[in-house]
Image (cartoon, grey):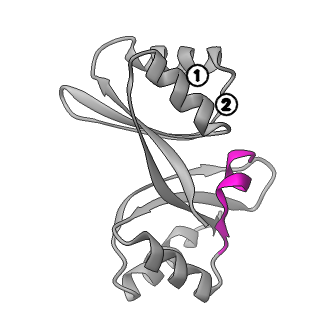
Amino acid sequence: MFADQISVFLENKAGRLAEVTRTLAGASVNIRALSLADTSDFGILRLIVDDNEKAESALKEAAFTVRTTRVVAVEVSDKPGGLMSILEFLDSKQINVEYMYAFVRQRHDNAVMIFRFDNTDSAVEALTAEGFAVIKGDELYTM
C-alpha cells in the first residue's frame, strides 16, 4: 500500500532542475508527479516516477544526492470538498500530514494525493478501514 518517492537535494541555482530532468530523460524515466520546495540555498525535489531503480541509479551516477521515501497515494474526488473530506478524516484520527502534493489523471473523476505521514502504517490502516482508495506503488507508477 506504499509507494516509493525519490527526493533529490538541489542547490538553488539556475539550471539544476533542468539537469535533473535531462538526466531522467536520458535514462528513459518518465515523471508521474513532482513537488519542489525551496529555501534560499537548497531545494528538495520530490518525484514519483515510472521506474524508481533506474531513476535513482541515473541520478546518483550524475552526482545528485538522492533519497527514497515511503509515501501513500490516495484517490480523492476531484470536485469541491474532495480534499477537505480526507483531511477532515485524518484530523479526526489525529494523523499528522508532513507534506502532500497532487496530480490529476487525464479522463478520470478523481485526483491522486501523495501524502507523507509521521506514522505511515497507522495512516494506511485508518484510510483503508474508512474506505479511501489507497493506490499501490506499482499502479501509481504507471498512471
Q: Considering only vertical position in the picture, is 28 above or below 44?
A: above
Marks 1 and 2 close (CB-CB < 8 Å): yes
User: Which secondary structure, mark 2?
Assistant: loop
Quadrant where the N terminus lies?
bottom right
Picture quadrant where residue 42 is located: top left
Residue closer to the observer: 34 or 117: 117
User: Which secondary structure, mark 1?
Assistant: helix
Return the residue found at the far left. 40
Q: Is residue 96 inside the magenta stretch?
A: no
Q: Specify whether 26 is left or right of 86.
A: right
Q: Residue at x 50, y 46 (%)?
A: 5
Q: Specify whether 36 is left or right of 106.
A: left
Q: Position of residue 120 (x, y in %)?
A: 44, 70
**Magenta extent:** 133-143
Picture quadrant where residue 55 is located: top right
Tell me the crowding category of disc 2: few under 14, some 14 to 19, or many 20 or more residues within 10 angstroms, Cα based: some
Q: Position of residue 3 (x, y in %)?
A: 57, 55
Q: In whole angstroms, how far apart are the C-alphas of marks 1 and 2? A: 7 Å
Q: Specify whether 86 is left or right of 132.
A: left
Q: Residue at x 34, y 83 (%)?
A: 94
User: What amino acid type is highlighted by mark number 2?
Assistant: Asn
The numbered disc on residue 30 is: 2
Q: Position of residue 141 (x, y in %)?
A: 68, 46
**Where is mark 1, residue-wise?**
24
